[in-house]
Image (cartoon, helix red, strand yellow):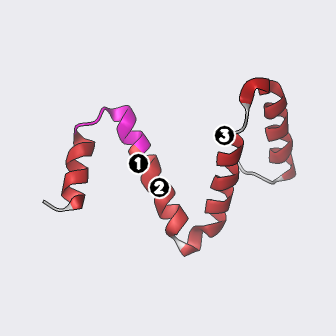
Amino acid sequence: MNIQDKTIAKIRNMPESLVQEVSDFVDFLLTKYSGDNWELWIQFSESLNMAESDFSDYLSNLEDYEERLARGEIYW
């Protein structure tokens, strides 16, 4: 059994919510390593940085996000 078969077998045993996360991660990897999608990777990285920021002051972060969205720095 090769690595793809082993991985598929693991995915088949996961609950649907985890399968969606695996699918999202595969999309992330495809975007990251595809030369044609470098701009999408940059946008994802910026979104990830924001997602990992300190959300203790939620309103402040939400306002910052809305301003960046309005300026076109990030896309919905």
- Contact, mark 3 vs mark 1 (Cβ under 8 Å): no
Q: Residues within 10 Å of mark 2 (few under 14, many from 20)?
A: few
- Determine the residue located farthest toward the left in the rendered image: 1
Image quarter of the N terminus: bottom left
Q: Secondary structure at mark 3?
A: loop
Cβ–Cβ below 8 Å for labels 2 and 1? yes
Q: Are marks 3 and 2 in contact (CB under 8 Å)?
A: no
- SS under mark 2: helix
Q: CA distance from mark 3 to mark 1?
A: 21 Å
In the figure, residue 15 lies in which quadrant? top left
Q: Which mark is residue 52?
A: 3
Foreground disc of the pair 3, 2: 3
Residue 44 position (above or below residue 59): below
Q: Magenta span has 28?
A: no
Q: What's the residue type where badge 2 is placed?
A: Asp
Q: Find disc 1 in the rendering and name its residue.
A: 23
Q: Is residue 23 left or right of residue 73?
A: left
Q: How would you classify the magenta stretch by its main secondary structure?
A: helix
Residue drawn at point x = 70 percent, y = 52 percent: 46
* Picture residue at 43% right of the left edge, 41% below the top: 21
Residue 26 occupies quadrant: bottom left
Above or below, 11 relative to 29: above
Residue 23, given in percent of the width and then of the height, sits at 40, 48
Q: State the mark number for residue 43.
A: none
Residue type for callout 3: Glu
Mark closest to the chain's N terminus, 3 or 1: 1
Q: Give the left or right position of residue 75, taking residue 8 as reference.
A: right
Q: Mark 2 highlights which residue? A: 27
